[in-house]
Image: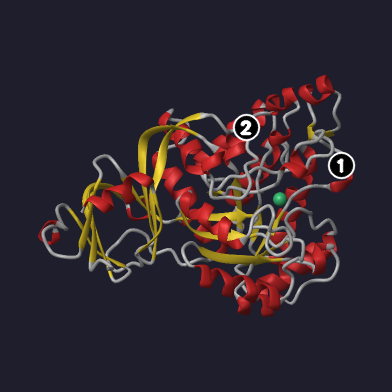
């Protein structure tokens, strides 16, 4: 039997966009937040069919949004599919994810975008927002039918996995996407500078004798694209920023009011290229893990607002693609279920303020692609994430909802976990401790 109302009792409700950070009750009824305030749920506590969640110390956040997820459907469902990917997203606290188009059948048509939207809706839970390709087949040549893609549900365009190399194509892509108010998301990599690369070019790659991906290969594309965005006045977003140079260029562009935005991944904030010293293929990502100076620069960029959001770049792979030599391994690591616990480490140690952390996973990504974000207020749709910031646990890949387990963080001790994820007032995920509590009522 469904509840009439759900009361979060004495939670710390945090929504930096509304300058909210207070211990209150939050009441959810008929899919919406109906009351927010000190003891606002008290009158309901003894009513029938009211579920009370009373977890002292828990944080209630606006639902988290991931701007950069690879769900592998259609075509590589042995790594992930929409159902497993959306379940992983819900378990990670995400109420919405944006799915990149570099699936085996590239999402460059209305038919595939519509299929994704319909299938995800039937699955329910975490919302799916497709990102469609910029160019047909992600080949970097002919532009896709962006108007069609947008009307089918695409929220942005990207050739992620490949860079739009041609300046002429990028210019036309910005102009064309701009007419439909779609943000162009660039995977910034000058492929001529990175051919055959296995990791960041630097002291560690020299020591290991591996081909390097120089940071300047990201910088030159971001610099060129910022100039093109300035020229076309179109919205431009840089995926997974990883270099000091890119952060500097973006900071300068933003200081002049250009419509440019950027994201950073948890792994580029948390790991350096030294993680490759054991030739661990789980640490092979694209762009690669960088050296200390670059990690410091992306952290500073996230803190000062040069980088608008955190995106997981969740990239599931099976052992087929990872249990092999580093040079043969596919790049990428899973991220949806690890993002919150890993990044809370940066909040706990003071590297990242709580307000920036919440913003970078909610209002930040919503703004980049123009998703509705109502925040934590009375009348808003109840897209909510409940977090226990202090619960210690060990990352255990056998518990992942994702079909894949490729992560260098497996076995790491972390502090803080997602307790529940609500989409439109319905539980898309609840932690074992919450569902157990439920049975005692
Ligand atoms: Zn990419």
- Which percent across, then down, holds residue 4? 23, 68
Residue positioned 53% across, 50% down in the render? 401
Describe the colour scheme in one phrase. secondary structure
The alpha-carbon separation of the residues under discs 2 and 1 comes to 21 Å
Residue positioned 82% across, 19% down in the render? 207
- Which percent across, then down, holds residue 321? 77, 44
Asked whether 19 or 44 is in front, the reply is 44
Mark 1, other Cα within 10 Å: few <14 / some 14–19 / many ≥20: some
Q: Mark 1 — residue? A: 193
- Does the numbered disc 2 mark a residue whose Cβ is under 8 Å from ligand 1? no
Asked whether 246 or 437 is in front, the reply is 437
Q: Mark 2 — residue? A: 295
- Which percent across, then down, holds residue 46? 10, 59
SS assignment at label 1 = helix
Q: Residue furthest top?
A: 207
- Give the mark nearest the N terminus, 2 or 1: 1
**Vertical side of 51 occupied by 176: above or below:** below
Residue 65 visible in this rendered orientation of the protein: no
In the rendered view of the protein, which quadrant contains the N terminus? bottom left
Asked whether 355 or 422 is in front, the reply is 422
């Amino acid at each position: 039997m469904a509840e009439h109302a759900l009361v979060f009792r004495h939670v710390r409700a945090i929504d930096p966009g509304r300058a909210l950070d207070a211990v209150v009750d939050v009441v959810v009824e008929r899919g919406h937040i109906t009351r927010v305030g000190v003891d606002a749920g008290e009158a309901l506590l003894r009513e029938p069919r009211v579920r009370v969640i009373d977890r002292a110390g828990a944080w209630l956040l606006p639902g988290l949004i991931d701007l950069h997820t690879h769900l592998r459907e259609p075509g590589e469902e042995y790594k992930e599919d929409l159902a497993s990917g959306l379940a992983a997203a819900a378990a990670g606290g995400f109420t919405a994810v944006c799915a990149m188009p570099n699936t085996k059948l590239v999402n460059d048509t209305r038919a595939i975008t519509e299929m994704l939207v319909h299938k995800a809706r039937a699955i329910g839970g975490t919302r799916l927002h497709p990102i469609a390709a910029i160019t047909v087949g992600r080949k970097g040549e002919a532009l896709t039918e962006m108007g069609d893609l947008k009307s089918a549900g695409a929220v942005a365009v990207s050739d992620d996995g490949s860079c739009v190399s041609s300046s002429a194509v990028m210019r036309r892509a910005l102009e064309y996407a701009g007419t439909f108010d779609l943000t162009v998301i660039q995977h910034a990599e000058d492929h001529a500078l990175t051919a055959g690369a296995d990791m960041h070019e630097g002291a560690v790659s020299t020591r290991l004798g591996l081909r390097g991906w120089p940071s300047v290969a990201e910088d030159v594309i971001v610099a060129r694209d910022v100039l093109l965005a300035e020229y076309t006045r179109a919205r431009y977003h840089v995926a997974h920023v990883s270099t000091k140079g890119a952060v500097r260029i973006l900071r300068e562009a933003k200081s002049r009011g250009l419509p440019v935005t950027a994201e950073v991944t948890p792994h580029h904030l948390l790991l350096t290229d030294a993680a490759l010293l054991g030739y661990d293929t789980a640490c092979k990502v694209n762009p690669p893990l960088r050296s200390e100076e670059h990690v410091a620069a992306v952290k500073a960029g996230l803190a000062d607002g040069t980088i608008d959001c955190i995106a997981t770049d969740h990239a599931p792979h099976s052992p087929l693609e990872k249990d092999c030599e580093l040079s043969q391994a596919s790049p990428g690591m899973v991220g949806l279920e690890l993002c919150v616990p890993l990044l809370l480490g940066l909040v706990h140690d003071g590297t990242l303020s709580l307000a920036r952390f919440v913003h970078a996973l909610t209002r930040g990504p919503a703004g980049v692609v123009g998703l509705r974000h109502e925040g934590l207020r009375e009348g808003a749709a109840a897209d909510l994430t409940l977090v226990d910031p202090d619960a210690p646990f060990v990352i255990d890949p056998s518990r992942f909802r994702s079909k894949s387990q490729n992560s260098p963080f497996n076995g790491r001790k972390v502090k803080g976990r997602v307790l529940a994820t609500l989409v439109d007032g319905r539980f898309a995920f609840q932690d074992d401790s919450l569902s157990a509590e439920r049975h005692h009522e």
